[in-house]
Image (tube, coloured by chain):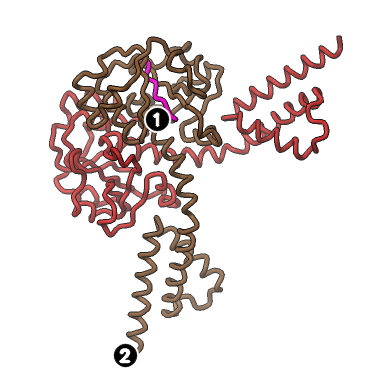
Chain colours: A brown, B red
């Protein structure tokens, strides 16, 4: 379970965009610590679009401690490193930290638009989470930062889902490679090359060309057609 | 090289946020096909903040073809799948497609806020790129979608950078594990367990606890202190 915690946000448009980003990525638990704007104002609702329910159900608290109370692990989003005692994690590496912790309540804490989180707020959290960004312009819009964290969380479960589908893709790449090799053989395309080398080259090319199983099937079908066309030409 | 191509965007705030997102992630090449708003209006510049240069240097063209002309590979962002002939890729898998293509010019094409890209525009692109999202509310804000693509691109190079740093982390985890094992041995904590098993357990725990090299060093120092404290107590 994921909880997004905003500390003193002041832009109603950001609140709306955050609600929409949460709905896009399948989350709904929003805590707002002492908001500096009306979270249900019309710019908020305009940017939330179909996610206004998340704003309506947001829990407003007056202290960050109250929002953290039942979080098992809390991540303070900040890019000012080195001044805190907590270990720091870069967002693309979040998966390493979360391995084996699925059932826990994770809190992600975002600071004010202008000056982020105070040192004492960061100290209340378990870890520091940093979004890598350009040193020329490192400061991200608040709603963009929230979206990136939610995307990374989705990415972690997406990857494990896709890994479990992998065997079907591998099988199809094997089938597709056979179909490609038949055409190459028919064309006399790899005389002198050992079978192992041809296997390797073809499999690599098919694999690169196949974003997913469906694409691999399409390539297989294409080469089956090519094969039957070549053979029918020979028959003439 | 990355080029962001927007087709008929109508929200000046989105344009501003996109410019900022590009600067945040270290990119600057923006093409806008027939913008439906003034890309240098005051809401645009307000949201671009320090990235107004990207808007000022944006190239305006009247047809998508002109923006695609010198792109080696073009990705159409759309979530309506199955109706196109191009292979489709999910954003978290973009790295698989890009392996070995670093030197190329990559174009990412984003459609209108309300109704995305037309089928004939998608057909002009080489691949379809889809951002996985909740089926309850799949439609992302345009600027959020651009940011996610730029983040994924950064993530790909970030991961290869971090992999090359790995040996230093591994070395430190080894040193830290030795320091932890000394304390455990001193406390008589693993009598009866084989050395191999202890090595495995400690290394795994240290590895999980160490988000980076600095964290591993901190743990090493902590356990060195514990060890000297335990030994000094024994001496009394």
Residue ID at (37%, 74%): A224
Label 1: which residue?
Answer: A134
Q: Secondary structure at mark 2?
A: loop
Q: What residue range appears in magenta? A: A1-7
Above or below A117: residue B70: below
Q: Residues within 10 Å of mark 1 (few under 14, many from 20)?
A: some
Q: Residues within 10 Å of mark 2 (few under 14, many from 20)?
A: few
The chain under label 1 reads A
Above or below A17: residue A224: below
What x and y, as percent, mark residue B86?
A: 30, 57
Above or below A122: residue A172: below
What x and y, as percent, mark residue A22?
A: 34, 31
The chain under label 2 reads A
Q: Secondary structure at mark 1?
A: loop
**Marks 2 and 1 in Cβ contact (< 8 Å):** no
Tell me which label, 2 or 1, sits earlier in the chain: 1
The disc label shown at residue B78, or none: none
Residue ID at (18%, 39%): B114
Of the pair A74 and B160, the residue shown nearer to us? A74
Quadrant of the drawing holding the N terminus of chain B:
top left
Quadrant hosting residue B219? top right
Question: Taken as a whole, is the magenta stretch helix, strand or loop?
Answer: strand
What is the CA distance from the residue labelled 2 to the residue labelled 1? 63 Å
Callouts 2 and 1 in the same chain: yes
């Amino acid at each position: 379970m994921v909880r997004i915690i905003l500390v003193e946000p002041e832009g109603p448009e950001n609140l709306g965009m955050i609600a929409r980003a949460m709905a896009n990525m399948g989350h709904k638990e929003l805590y707002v610590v002492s908001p500096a704007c009306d979270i249900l104002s019309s710019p908020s609702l305009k940017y939330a679009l179909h996610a206004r329910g998340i704003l309506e159900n947001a829990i407003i608290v007056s202290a960050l401690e109250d929002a953290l109370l039942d979080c098992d692990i809390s991540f303070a989003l900040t890019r000012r490193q080195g001044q805190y005692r907590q270990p720091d994690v870069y967002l693309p590496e979040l998966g390493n930290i979360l391995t084996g912790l699925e059932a826990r309540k994770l809190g992600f804490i975002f600071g004010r638009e202008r000056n982020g989180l105070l040192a004492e707020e960061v100290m209340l959290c378990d870890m520091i989470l940093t979004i890598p960004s350009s040193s020329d312009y490192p400061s991200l819009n608040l709603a963009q930062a929230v979206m990136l964290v939610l995307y990374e969380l989705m990415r972690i479960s997406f990857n494990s889902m896709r890994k479990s589908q992998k065997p079907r893709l591998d099988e199809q790449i094997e089938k597709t490679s056979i179909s490609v090799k038949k055409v190459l053989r028919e064309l006399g395309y790899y005389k002198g090359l050992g079978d192992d080398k041809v296997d390797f080259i073809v499999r690599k090319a098919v694999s690169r060309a196949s974003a997913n199983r469906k694409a691999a099937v399409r390539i297989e079908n294409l080469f089956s057609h090519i094969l039957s066309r070549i053979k029918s030409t020979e028959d003439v």
